[in-house]
Image: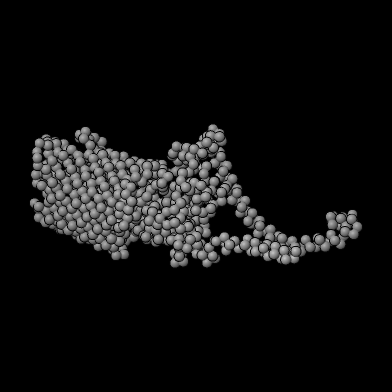
């Protein structure tokens, strides 16, 4: 059996006499040029493939966007109206002023998404976790040569710093601190030794409207001076092993209302290169001395209707990067048990210069207590200066501090006068672990001077 | 007639040459300048951002989280590339003037004090940075000038476009090491 292969060329040659040779020549030419054309087509196909891929991606985006818009809006007419109601403001809105002349279609693509964001209320994404936790801790070995004291290893504060971006404008910030040891209110020891307790040291809902106006509602660190808001409950951030005496926490012998519960507004002040900032706060203030066993931070109940107010202003001039100078004024009315009411005014000023490799902190505070019915005002001045320079992983530092309270002070008569220098060395073993060795020499009014030595391992995790 | 044809041919050839090498005729940078521009870092923002030009000082406040909102009220979201990437090294060196450790610590402390409202997002590729900036109205990031496409907007720095010889942001070969 013979098979005959069908050939259109042969058919054409048979059908049209005389055309056979010409057709064969043309066919031969096509056969010769085919590889060249194929190579050219391959390059073009590659480009086309990329273009198609891009177009498909765009179509997918647009389709999903259309589906979303159809779900949220009644119809296309309303969408168009909305888009014209909210044009991007400013000179960049027009394509003529756009620095890079992007293709018009590409430039138009993002607009519907972003315009619609103005229309829709902020929503919580239930599919993702909003909480972020960062930990800080320290372990110490310390001792002082004062009679009745022993050297000991001690666990410092274990701090869980929690933040959550609730929405574009709202954020939660909290510090949950586990700490051991007895309390010490105004230099009067209390509470139980070696027992761990949990404190919510900060508990804030922040609202950020713009650079000039931010609100925080909850428990915060009072903006008195610099140190209190620059360093919170983490020793790892601090160059030294601990806070200056002036800024000790309320339950560690501190004299200031370190924490406050209330409302805080802060932001920049339009001031050009001067870099002015403000903080304005209103809160419950600190509880009065009596009874000493009470929690000094008035988390839930205020002992009076008068609210503590604080105003701070500071400048960060552009010309000297790292410099910050400022002052603050705080006022509250205290109601110590069995004593007349006391007007409390705290004035603070600071000048700090902080660079990544150098720091020089200087702060002065004056606490004024004026009992009702008396013309006498009790002034308690205090200051500290601290200087540190970094050499690679090593950072030697020096601090001198001073507080002088009257023995007849109506709120904290046991504080008295205390002053002295501290020397130390910080060694950053890694980005997250710092080893510090600090020597303190303290001179006090009614007790013998004493030396202290602290070895601290501070870390973040 | 022949002269006219010759003239037309010359004009046509000239036009063809102009079309083949448009850069020389349209005032675009020379090949050397173009190669240099390819090493420039483009600061990119979302297309709806009204900002066109920014000073290096302002850029520093943005990249250090000291400024949290754009003039249009949108919250600034900073996009950084992975540590060790040449583009990131250049940004840390030329804008932040910090090393990697100092930068991390600066942001951690800023978040801790509450002064920095949101931490930077870290992405590994220029495509990822572009997509993020495209999708987030307040985002700002950086990519090589050669990685820019029409989905994002490039802003000038100190009045200089990314192709200008005076453009201040560029990564160097040593950044790639």
Q: Residue B25, percent across and down?
A: 58, 62
Residue B138 visible, this orientation: yes
Q: Residue at x 48, y 39 (%)?
A: A86
Instruction: Indicate whether A188 appears above or below A394.
Output: above
Instruction: Indicate whether B137 appears above or below A75.
Output: below
Q: Is residue A120 left or right of residue A240?
A: right
Q: How is the image coloured?
A: one colour
Who is closer to the viewer here, A247 or B74? B74
Q: Residue A392, percent across and down?
A: 31, 64
Q: Residue at x 11, y 53 (%)?
A: A444
Q: Residue at x 44, y 49 (%)?
A: B51
Instruction: Residue lying at the far right in this picture: please name it.
Output: A17
Q: Residue B83, percent across and down?
A: 42, 58
Q: Residue at x 48, y 61 (%)?
A: B164
Instruction: Indicate whether A397 appears above or below A333.
Output: below
Q: Is residue A123 left or right of residue A329?
A: right
């Amino acid at each position: 059996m013979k098979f005959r292969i069908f050939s259109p060329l042969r058919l054409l040659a048979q059908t049209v006499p005389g055309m056979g040779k010409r057709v064969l020549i043309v066919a031969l030419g096509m056969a010769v040029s085919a590889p060249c054309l194929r190579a050219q087509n391959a390059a073009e196909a590659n480009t086309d493939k990329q273009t198609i891929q891009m177009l498909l991606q765009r179509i997918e985006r647009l389709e999903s966007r259309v589906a979303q818009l159809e779900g949220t809006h009644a119809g296309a007419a309303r969408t168009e109206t909305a888009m014209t109601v909210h044009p991007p403001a400013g000179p960049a809105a027009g394509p003529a002023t756009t620095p890079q002349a992007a293709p018009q279609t590409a430039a138009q693509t993002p607009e519907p998404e972003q315009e619609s964001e103005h229309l829709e209320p902020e929503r919580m994404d239930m599919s993702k976790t909003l909480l972020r936790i960062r930990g800080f801790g320290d372990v110490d070995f310390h001792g002082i040569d004062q009679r009745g004291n022993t050297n000991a290893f001690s666990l410092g504060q274990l701090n869980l710093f929690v933040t959550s971006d609730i929405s574009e404008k709202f954020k939660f910030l909290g510090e949950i601190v586990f700490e051991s040891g007895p309390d010490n209110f105004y230099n009067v020891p209390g509470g139980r030794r070696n027992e761990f307790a949990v404190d919510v040291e900060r508990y804030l809902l922040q609202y950020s409207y713009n650079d000039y106006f931010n609100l925080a509602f909850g428990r915060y660190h009072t903006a008195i001076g610099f140190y209190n808001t620059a360093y919170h409950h983490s020793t790892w951030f601090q160059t030294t092993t601990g806070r200056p005496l002036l800024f000790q926490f309320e339950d560690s012998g501190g004299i200031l209302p370190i924490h406050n519960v209330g409302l805080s507004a802060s932001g920049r002040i339009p001031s050009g290169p001067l870099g002015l900032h403000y903080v304005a706060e209103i809160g419950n203030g600190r509880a009065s001395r009596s009874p000493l066993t009470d929690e000094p931070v008035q988390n839930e109940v205020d002992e009076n209707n008068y609210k503590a107010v604080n105003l701070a202003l500071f400048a960060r001039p552009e010309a000297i990067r790292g410099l910050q100078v400022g002052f603050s004024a705080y006022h509250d009315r205290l109601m110590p048990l069995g004593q007349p009411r006391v007007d409390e005014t705290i004035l603070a000023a600071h000048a700090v210069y902080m660079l990544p490799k150098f720091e020089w902190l200087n702060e002065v505070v004056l606490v004024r207590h004026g009992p009702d019915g008396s013309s006498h005002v009790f002034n308690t001045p205090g200051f500290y200066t601290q200087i540190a320079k970094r050499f690679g992983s090593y950072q030697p530092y020096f601090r001198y501090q001073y507080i002088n309270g009257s023995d007849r002070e109506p709120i904290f008569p046991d504080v008295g006068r205390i002053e002295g220098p501290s020397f130390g060395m910080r060694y950053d073993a890694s980005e997250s672990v710092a080893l510090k060795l600090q020597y303190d020499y303290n001179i006090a009014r009614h007790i013998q001077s004493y030396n202290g030595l602290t070895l601290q391992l501070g870390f973040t995790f | 007639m022949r002269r006219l044809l010759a003239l037309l041919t010359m004009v046509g050839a000239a036009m063809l040459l102009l079309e083949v090498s448009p850069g020389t005729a349209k005032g675009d940078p020379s090949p050397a300048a173009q190669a240099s521009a390819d090493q420039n870092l483009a600061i990119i923002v979302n297309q709806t951002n009204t900002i066109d030009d920014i000073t290096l000082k302002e850029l520093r406040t943005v990249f250090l989280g000291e400024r949290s909102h754009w003039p249009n009220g949108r919250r600034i979201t900073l996009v950084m590339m992975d540590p060790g990437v040449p583009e990131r090294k250049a940004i840390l060196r030329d804008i932040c003037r910090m090393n990697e450790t100092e930068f991390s610590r600066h942001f951690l402390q800023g978040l801790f004090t509450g002064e920095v409202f949101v931490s930077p997002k870290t992405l590994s590729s220029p495509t990822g940075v572009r997509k993020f900036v495209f999708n987030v109205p307040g985002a700002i990031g950086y990519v090589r000038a050669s990685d820019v496409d029409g989905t994002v907007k490039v802003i000038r720095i100190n009045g200089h476009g990314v192709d200008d010889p005076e453009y201040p942001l560029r990564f160097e070969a040593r950044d790639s090491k």
